[in-house]
Amino acid sequence: MTVNLKLRQGLKEYRHKLELGLIETPQKLDPIEKAKQNPRSLRFAINAKCFECSGFERPEVKNCEFHDCPLHRHRPWQNKASV
Ligand code: SF4
C-alpha cells in the first residue's frame, strides 16, 4: 500500500468518525490561542503578536508598513494570496 493510499484511507476513516460523532470537530484557534497552547513556539508567539498588533486582522499583518519593527521580516502571512 502506497503512502498516498494510506493517507486517503486514513482521511476517509477520519471523516467517517466525524460523521458518526465518534470524534469532535477540530476547533479552529486564532493565533493568540495557538500561542497560549504552545508557549515554547517562537513562530506562534510572533504570529500572535502581529495578529494583536494589527487589530486582529490577518490582511493587515501581510500589509504591515512598519519596516522598523524587529518582527517585520518574520511576520506571518506575507506570501499568501488571500488570508
Ligand atoms: S511586524 Fe508589523 S504587525 Fe508585526 S508586530 Fe511589527 S508592526 Fe506589528
Image: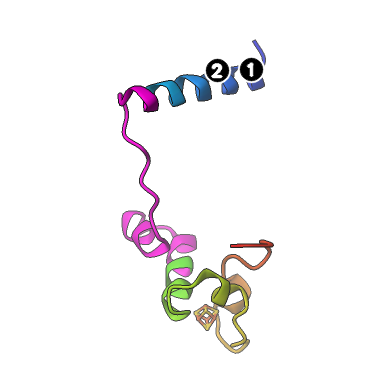
Residue 5 is marked as: 1
Do the residues under discs 1 and 2 have CB atoms within 8 angstroms? yes
Residue at 60%, 89% (x, y): give it: 68
Q: Nearer the viewer, residue 60 or 69?
A: 60
Q: Secondary structure at mark 1?
A: helix
Is residue 40 shown left or right of residue 4? left
Residue 14 screen position, x and y as percent: 44, 25
Q: Which residue is mark 2?
A: 9
Q: In the displayed structure, would residue 25 be above or below residue 13? A: below
| Residue furthest out toward the front | 19
Is residue 42 shown left or right of residue 76? left
Is residue 37 shown left or right of residue 77? left
Q: Quadrant of the N terminus?
A: top right
Sort mark 2 into few (<14), some (14-19) or many (20+) by Cα contacts within 10 Å.
few
Residue at 43%, 21% (x, y): give it: 16
Residue 42 screen position, x and y as percent: 46, 63
Residue 41 is marked as: none
Magenta residues? 18-46
Q: In the displayed structure, would residue 26 be above or below residue 11? A: below
Residue 6 screen position, x and y as percent: 58, 17
In the image, residue 62 lies in the stretch drawn in magenta: no
Mark 2: which amino acid?
Gln
Q: In the displayed structure, would residue 14 be above or below residue 48? A: above
Is residue 80 shown left or right of residue 20? right
Q: Secondary structure at mark 2?
A: helix
Q: CA distance from mark 1 to mark 2?
A: 6 Å
Mark 1: which amino acid?
Leu
Q: Nearer the viewer, residue 65 or 41?
A: 65
Residue at 32%, 28% (x, y): give it: 23
